[in-house]
Amino acid sequence: MTQGYYAGISGLQSNQSGMDVVSNNLANISTTAYKGSTAEFADIFSKVVSSGNTPTSNDIGYGARLQATSIQFAQGSMLASDRFNDLALEGDGWFGVTSNKQTSFTRDGTFAFDTYQKVSGAINSSTDRLVTGDGQYVNGTMLTNFAYNGAFDYGDTVTNGTSGAYVISNPTTDVPLAGVEKQGILEFPTRLAYPVIPTTVSQFFGNLGTTNETRTISSDVISGNNDTNRLKLTFTKSATQPTEGVSWDIAATVTSADGSIVYDTQNGQALFGTSGGLVSSTLPSVNNDGSAVSIDLGSNYSGVISIDSLGLSGSSISDGISGGTLTKYGINADGVIIADFSNGHQSAIGRVAVYHFQNEQGLNTESGTYYSESSNSGKPLFWTDASGNTISGAGIKSGYLEGSNVDMSVGLTDMIVMQRAYQANSKTITTVDEMIQKALQMHR
């Protein structure tokens, strides 16, 4: 009969532990990216009443125990924030964070910036490292397509007192993730510049007609000093014309935008056939404040033509990109860190890593919303697509945070169940006690 005591006591203990689990879930209902747990109970063991061959079970159980607290990894709701460095994961995956060479994993993307001077003695070499609220560094892959240039004029040398900035050397939008073991600290340079790409070719289009009148076609060209200069072609009919077709003399002049400085003037001649298509041009390249610009008049009817029956026209296209300074950072759905520049261009500089595990239930729970790998979870890994390319495997939402996945209604219901079970087990103990007392009284 005393067996009922121990069964009742085990019921009290296991349901008390279950209540602890439910209470903890409810306490963390507002914790960012918190994952609730479920209490799982199991029979302790049973005793065979009789070893005889019977058609039915003849075991008596000895109570219950808390077998496991399984983590529920269901997606939490998305909560909007006003910071691009707040990140939320949609789907499976974990952010990796590192402190003292120890890597933990979390879905809490409440990240901030830790500013430090990367180049000793260079006050303009500051970068912002992406960190958690308790100072752990967020893991990811950084590109090597930018470097600090202490002599670079960021446009504020006079007001800032000194030059220096990080300069993009190879603009790109693609950031392949490095290996799992090669992830490092994510850094955002506070002064980042898009390089000047001087104009090398200017293409001209239009119809000069055939009458003896001066024609001009102009184009904007970018110099190596990041100035937008003006390249103007002046066409005048040649004094001596060929026996077939028409010939135009060309003067190519490069000036500053306001025309106050003349950088170069070159002369040449263009010959057009009897049908007006361009046959040849002797116009050489021009000097655009130190950068050579070749002039492309096209060929045949693809560029500049000389046809009497068509209306006069003129247009141009030049390559080259003006330099720009950083305006803002962004993080796209693949975790790629994109820098926007004042010249309208963009470039990636890194990528946030998203880790996965073979068995998430095997992760060890740490303080806060951190987890660590174990022999049951397996090593962290990156997912790949059918072509073997590393992919995030989860969408990243910048400017959002993942809420707790604890359902209050489920928690309150579980609390009622645990409470009733606890009461029932306490009743078992008191009932067994009354039975024992009754048995003891029978000797009278």
Image: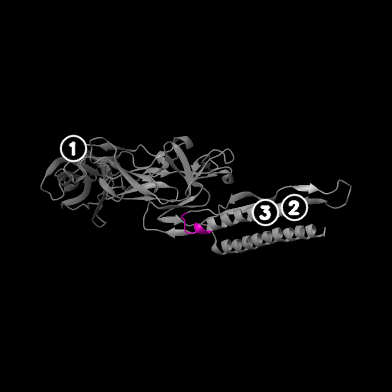
- In percent of width and height, residue 42 lies at 69, 50
- Disc number placed over residue 2 in the picture, else none: 2
Quarter of the image holding residue 223? top left
Residue designated by label 3: 9
Kind of residue sitting beneath label 1: Gly
The answer to whether residue 226 is left or right of residue 350 is: left
Mark 1 vs 2, N-terminal side: 2
| Near-viewer residue (143 or 298) | 143
Label 1 element class: loop
- Give the Cα distance between marks 3 and 2: 11 Å
The answer to whether residue 281 is visible is no
Mark 3 vs 2, N-terminal side: 2
The answer to whether residue 87 is left or right of residue 385 is: left
Kind of residue sitting beneath label 3: Ile
| Near-viewer residue (143 or 161) | 161
Please say whether residue 55 is one of the residues in the magenta stretch: no
**Range of the magenta residues?**
26-32
The answer to whether residue 211 is left or right of residue 349 is: left
Label 2 element class: helix
- In percent of width and height, residue 254 lies at 16, 44
- In percent of width and height, residue 321 lies at 27, 45
Q: Colour mode?
A: one colour
What residue is rendered at 57% in x and 41% in y? 377
- Give the Cα distance between marks 1 and 2: 100 Å
